[in-house]
Image (cartoon, helix red, strand yellow):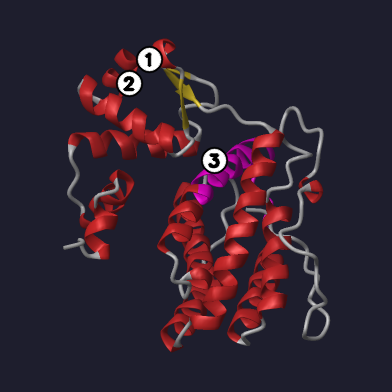
Amino acid sequence: MRPKKDERDNKHPLARLRASEAGGERTLSEQAYWLMHRDILAGVLAPDEKLRLQGLQERYNLGMSPIREALMLLSREGLVSNEGQRGFRVTPVSVQDLQDIVWARVNIETILLAQSIRLGDADWGAEISAAFYKLTHATVPASLEDVENQEAWEGAHRRFHRALLAGARSPWLHRVDNQLVDLTERYRRIRLARMGFTARTDSIFTEHKALMEAALARDADTACQLLREHLTATFDAQTWLDDGRAALDDIPAPAPKRMASKAAIPRATRARR
């Protein structure tokens, strides 16, 4: 007898980690994974930093085995580079890497969004509306030192984008997209550290409102075009990555651009995450 789908998914090591996070029960390996995952995204463990096992043991007060297992899992996600006998280091950053990540995310999320619009039910629409309300009523942090408001705003922002895609029914595409979101999150944190938080309340409201309205109107063409513009503008690397030699406008389009089926799409100033 074949195992049920949920049982198959939970055998995947990363799926088990996500489940343990939700349930609040973690093994030592899972603790190591989430602690390093958090610190890599936050930049505490910097890009290209050598990850010495003894130093990680001392930092997290955990044994060698859970540290090694966590590093192997993080290498599968692309956050850590496994250099064999030379050990591990935080994956470096580059314009080319960010372009590729965003290109992949645009392709996957437009597929998910189109499917979500086609299959989403009333609960899907209600969650988008609730997430939009939460996002537009969250306090936009004034600086990187405003940690409490920054975390609340980031949570609301991620909830809104997840809600848009939640009607899609491809677990593998969702899983890959979650990984890509984490990879782009690392770049977004680097951008904030170098340029500060530049999002404006009016542009946040206008851009996300347009996305919500297109999705709820079941206008997949307009919604996907808006989403692509949002992602490429948010992660335009030319002005803030050290070796910025190319803008994300150069990434290949996922499909030939079609005319929007509704009236003119609002061209709001792009919110910077």
The question of residue 195 being in magenta is answered with yes
| Residue 103 picture location, percent across and down | 67, 50
Q: Secondary structure at mark 1?
A: loop
Mark 1 and mark 3: Cα distance apart in space: 21 Å
The chief SS type of the magenta part is helix
Q: Is residue 106 above or below residue 99?
A: below
Mark 1 and mark 2: Cα distance apart in space: 6 Å
Q: Name the amino acid type tagged 2.
A: Leu
Q: Is residue 123 above or below residue 50?
A: below
Q: Which quarter of the rendering shows the N terminus? A: bottom left
Q: Secondary structure at mark 2?
A: helix
Circle 1 residue: 52
Q: Name the amino acid type tagged 1.
A: Arg
Q: Earlier in the sequence, mark 2 or mark 3?
A: 2
Residue 257 visible somewhere in the drawing: yes
Q: Earlier in the sequence, mark 1 or mark 3?
A: 1
| 143 relative to 120 in the view: left or right | right
